[in-house]
Amino acid sequence: MKNNHGKAIKRIIMAALLAALILSAGCIGQDTGAANGQNANTAQATATPTPASTEKLPIPPEKLAEFMPASSDTWKAEELMYGTEKDGLTLMSWASQTYKNAMSPASVTITIQDTMGEPIGNADGWEYFYDFTYPNYEMHAKKVQEYPSWLIFDREADTITQLTMIENRIVVSIDVANGQLTYITPYENAISFKKLAELTK
Protein backbone atom coordinates (compact mmCIF):
# COMPACT_ATOMS: atom_id res chain seq x y z
CA MET A 1 0.00 0.00 0.00
CA LYS A 2 2.79 2.38 0.91
CA ASN A 3 4.50 1.64 -2.41
CA ASN A 4 1.32 2.60 -4.29
CA HIS A 5 1.24 5.86 -2.34
CA GLY A 6 4.85 6.43 -3.31
CA LYS A 7 4.10 6.00 -7.00
CA ALA A 8 1.06 8.24 -6.75
CA ILE A 9 2.90 11.00 -4.94
CA LYS A 10 5.78 10.86 -7.42
CA ARG A 11 3.33 11.38 -10.28
CA ILE A 12 1.70 14.29 -8.42
CA ILE A 13 4.96 16.05 -7.65
CA MET A 14 6.34 15.47 -11.13
CA ALA A 15 3.18 17.08 -12.51
CA ALA A 16 3.78 20.05 -10.21
CA LEU A 17 7.39 20.31 -11.32
CA LEU A 18 6.40 20.12 -14.96
CA ALA A 19 3.84 22.88 -14.46
CA ALA A 20 6.44 25.05 -12.74
CA LEU A 21 9.00 24.44 -15.47
CA ILE A 22 6.46 25.30 -18.18
CA LEU A 23 5.65 28.54 -16.39
CA SER A 24 9.27 29.50 -15.79
CA ALA A 25 10.10 28.84 -19.43
CA GLY A 26 7.43 31.31 -20.45
CA CYS A 27 5.55 28.82 -22.62
CA ILE A 28 2.19 30.04 -21.38
CA GLY A 29 0.78 33.48 -22.17
CA GLN A 30 2.69 35.81 -19.92
CA ASP A 31 3.29 39.35 -18.82
CA THR A 32 6.85 40.58 -18.46
CA GLY A 33 7.94 43.22 -16.02
CA ALA A 34 10.28 44.11 -13.18
CA ALA A 35 9.97 43.98 -9.43
CA ASN A 36 11.28 46.65 -7.07
CA GLY A 37 12.82 48.53 -9.98
CA GLN A 38 15.29 45.79 -10.78
CA ASN A 39 15.79 44.02 -14.11
CA ALA A 40 13.58 46.58 -15.86
CA ASN A 41 12.99 45.82 -19.52
CA THR A 42 11.22 47.52 -22.37
CA ALA A 43 8.84 44.69 -23.22
CA GLN A 44 5.19 45.64 -23.13
CA ALA A 45 3.04 43.58 -20.78
CA THR A 46 0.23 41.68 -22.43
CA ALA A 47 -3.30 42.27 -21.20
CA THR A 48 -4.46 40.16 -18.27
CA PRO A 49 -7.54 38.08 -19.15
CA THR A 50 -10.73 39.75 -17.96
CA PRO A 51 -12.45 37.42 -15.46
CA ALA A 52 -16.19 36.89 -15.23
CA SER A 53 -17.86 39.05 -12.59
CA THR A 54 -18.40 36.07 -10.25
CA GLU A 55 -14.90 34.67 -10.71
CA LYS A 56 -12.49 34.82 -7.79
CA LEU A 57 -9.33 36.71 -8.64
CA PRO A 58 -5.84 35.38 -7.95
CA ILE A 59 -3.15 37.46 -6.32
CA PRO A 60 -1.97 39.94 -8.98
CA PRO A 61 1.14 38.52 -10.65
CA GLU A 62 2.92 41.83 -10.10
CA LYS A 63 2.57 41.24 -6.35
CA LEU A 64 4.12 37.79 -6.63
CA ALA A 65 6.96 39.25 -8.72
CA GLU A 66 7.84 41.62 -5.87
CA PHE A 67 9.06 38.64 -3.84
CA MET A 68 11.85 37.76 -6.28
CA PRO A 69 15.29 38.27 -4.70
CA ALA A 70 17.72 40.83 -6.10
CA SER A 71 20.60 39.94 -8.38
CA SER A 72 24.12 39.70 -6.90
CA ASP A 73 27.72 39.69 -8.14
CA THR A 74 27.72 35.89 -8.21
CA TRP A 75 24.11 35.26 -9.25
CA LYS A 76 22.86 37.29 -12.21
CA ALA A 77 19.10 37.57 -12.56
CA GLU A 78 17.64 36.97 -15.99
CA GLU A 79 14.39 38.45 -17.30
CA LEU A 80 11.61 38.48 -14.73
CA MET A 81 8.44 36.92 -16.09
CA TYR A 82 4.94 36.97 -14.65
CA GLY A 83 1.38 36.60 -15.80
CA THR A 84 -1.93 34.83 -15.46
CA GLU A 85 -3.36 31.70 -17.01
CA LYS A 86 -6.54 29.68 -16.93
CA ASP A 87 -6.69 26.13 -15.64
CA GLY A 88 -10.15 25.01 -16.63
CA LEU A 89 -12.42 27.71 -15.23
CA THR A 90 -9.93 28.96 -12.65
CA LEU A 91 -7.73 31.98 -13.26
CA MET A 92 -4.29 31.62 -11.67
CA SER A 93 -1.25 33.87 -11.41
CA TRP A 94 2.48 33.25 -11.38
CA ALA A 95 5.91 34.88 -11.40
CA SER A 96 9.26 33.33 -12.28
CA GLN A 97 12.90 34.32 -12.46
CA THR A 98 16.14 32.47 -13.18
CA TYR A 99 19.51 33.35 -11.63
CA LYS A 100 22.69 32.22 -13.41
CA ASN A 101 25.93 31.60 -11.53
CA ALA A 102 28.74 33.75 -12.94
CA MET A 103 31.43 31.16 -12.12
CA SER A 104 29.76 27.83 -12.99
CA PRO A 105 26.98 26.31 -15.13
CA ALA A 106 24.65 26.29 -12.12
CA SER A 107 21.35 28.13 -12.12
CA VAL A 108 18.48 28.70 -9.69
CA THR A 109 14.91 29.25 -10.89
CA ILE A 110 12.22 30.54 -8.56
CA THR A 111 8.55 30.20 -9.46
CA ILE A 112 5.75 31.49 -7.24
CA GLN A 113 2.26 30.39 -8.26
CA ASP A 114 -1.16 31.24 -6.83
CA THR A 115 -3.13 28.06 -7.56
CA MET A 116 -6.33 29.49 -5.99
CA GLY A 117 -6.51 26.28 -3.96
CA GLU A 118 -7.13 24.14 -7.02
CA PRO A 119 -5.71 20.58 -6.89
CA ILE A 120 -3.65 20.95 -10.07
CA GLY A 121 -0.88 18.59 -9.00
CA ASN A 122 0.39 20.87 -6.25
CA ALA A 123 -1.96 20.56 -3.28
CA ASP A 124 -2.61 16.81 -3.16
CA GLY A 125 1.06 16.02 -2.75
CA TRP A 126 1.09 16.87 0.93
CA GLU A 127 -1.52 14.22 1.84
CA TYR A 128 1.23 11.58 2.01
CA PHE A 129 3.89 13.59 3.80
CA TYR A 130 6.80 11.20 4.29
CA ASP A 131 10.09 10.44 2.56
CA PHE A 132 10.46 8.41 -0.63
CA THR A 133 13.70 7.04 -2.05
CA TYR A 134 14.23 5.63 -5.53
CA PRO A 135 17.54 4.74 -7.25
CA ASN A 136 17.97 8.14 -8.93
CA TYR A 137 15.23 10.10 -7.19
CA GLU A 138 14.59 11.14 -3.58
CA MET A 139 11.80 13.13 -1.94
CA HIS A 140 12.11 14.35 1.63
CA ALA A 141 9.28 15.93 3.62
CA LYS A 142 10.32 18.98 5.66
CA LYS A 143 9.15 22.35 6.94
CA VAL A 144 10.33 25.67 5.52
CA GLN A 145 9.43 28.78 7.53
CA GLU A 146 6.77 26.60 9.23
CA TYR A 147 5.18 25.54 5.91
CA PRO A 148 5.16 21.99 4.47
CA SER A 149 7.75 21.44 1.79
CA TRP A 150 9.23 18.74 -0.41
CA LEU A 151 12.96 18.55 -1.09
CA ILE A 152 13.40 16.59 -4.32
CA PHE A 153 16.66 15.22 -5.73
CA ASP A 154 16.53 14.14 -9.37
CA ARG A 155 19.97 12.75 -10.18
CA GLU A 156 19.18 11.96 -13.81
CA ALA A 157 18.25 15.58 -14.49
CA ASP A 158 20.91 16.90 -12.05
CA THR A 159 18.33 19.07 -10.29
CA ILE A 160 17.41 19.76 -6.69
CA THR A 161 13.97 21.26 -6.13
CA GLN A 162 12.27 22.61 -3.05
CA LEU A 163 8.48 22.91 -3.32
CA THR A 164 6.67 24.70 -0.50
CA MET A 165 2.90 24.99 -0.06
CA ILE A 166 1.58 28.14 1.65
CA GLU A 167 -2.00 28.24 2.94
CA ASN A 168 -2.96 25.38 0.57
CA ARG A 169 -2.80 27.89 -2.25
CA ILE A 170 0.58 29.42 -3.06
CA VAL A 171 3.39 27.15 -4.26
CA VAL A 172 6.98 28.37 -4.10
CA SER A 173 9.37 26.34 -6.23
CA ILE A 174 13.14 26.82 -5.92
CA ASP A 175 14.88 24.73 -8.56
CA VAL A 176 18.66 24.27 -8.70
CA ALA A 177 20.17 22.93 -11.92
CA ASN A 178 23.78 21.67 -12.08
CA GLY A 179 24.37 22.88 -8.54
CA GLN A 180 24.36 22.11 -4.84
CA LEU A 181 21.75 21.91 -2.10
CA THR A 182 23.32 24.90 -0.35
CA TYR A 183 22.28 27.13 -3.27
CA ILE A 184 18.66 26.91 -2.13
CA THR A 185 19.19 28.39 1.33
CA PRO A 186 19.92 32.06 0.49
CA TYR A 187 16.91 32.23 -1.85
CA GLU A 188 14.67 30.51 0.66
CA ASN A 189 15.75 33.04 3.30
CA ALA A 190 15.24 35.99 0.95
CA ILE A 191 11.53 35.22 0.46
CA SER A 192 9.09 35.92 3.29
CA PHE A 193 6.61 33.06 3.14
CA LYS A 194 4.62 34.68 5.92
CA LYS A 195 4.09 37.81 3.82
CA LEU A 196 3.06 35.62 0.89
CA ALA A 197 0.53 33.97 3.19
CA GLU A 198 -0.88 37.39 4.10
CA LEU A 199 -1.71 37.96 0.43
CA THR A 200 -4.23 35.09 0.58
CA LYS A 201 -6.31 36.74 3.32
Image (cartoon, rainbow, N blue to C red):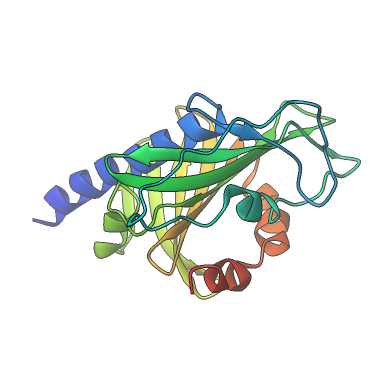
**Residue in front for this viewpoint, 96 or 29:** 29
> Is residue 128 visible to the viewer in this orientation of the structure?
no
From the viewer's perspective, tell me whether residue 195 is left or right of residue 130. Answer: right
Tell me the residue at 49%/68% (across/down).
Answer: 200
Location of residue 43 (image quadrant): top right
* Vertical relation: 138 (above or below) 164: above
The reply, left or right, for residue 14 in relation to residue 178 is left
Residue in view at x 62 percent, y 71 percent: 195
Farthest residue, direction right: 73
Most foreground residue, 85 or 9: 85
Q: Is residue 106 left or right of residue 50?
A: right
- Which residue of the protein is positioned furthest toward the front in this rendering? 53
- Count of all numbered marks drawn on residues in the image: 0
Measuring from the top left, give residue 11's x and y in whole percent. Answer: 26, 40
Q: Can the viewer see residue 171?
A: yes
- x, y percentage for residue 105? 72, 26
Residue 76, quarter of the rendered image: top right
What is the x, y in percent for residue 192? 66, 67
Q: Residue 110's x, y, as percent?
A: 61, 44
Q: Which quadrant, please, contains the N terminus?
A: bottom left
Instruction: Please name whichever residue, 6 or 16, is drawn nearer the observer in this view of the structure.
Output: 16
Report whether 182 appears left or right of 149.
right
Residue found at x 66% / y 39%: 97
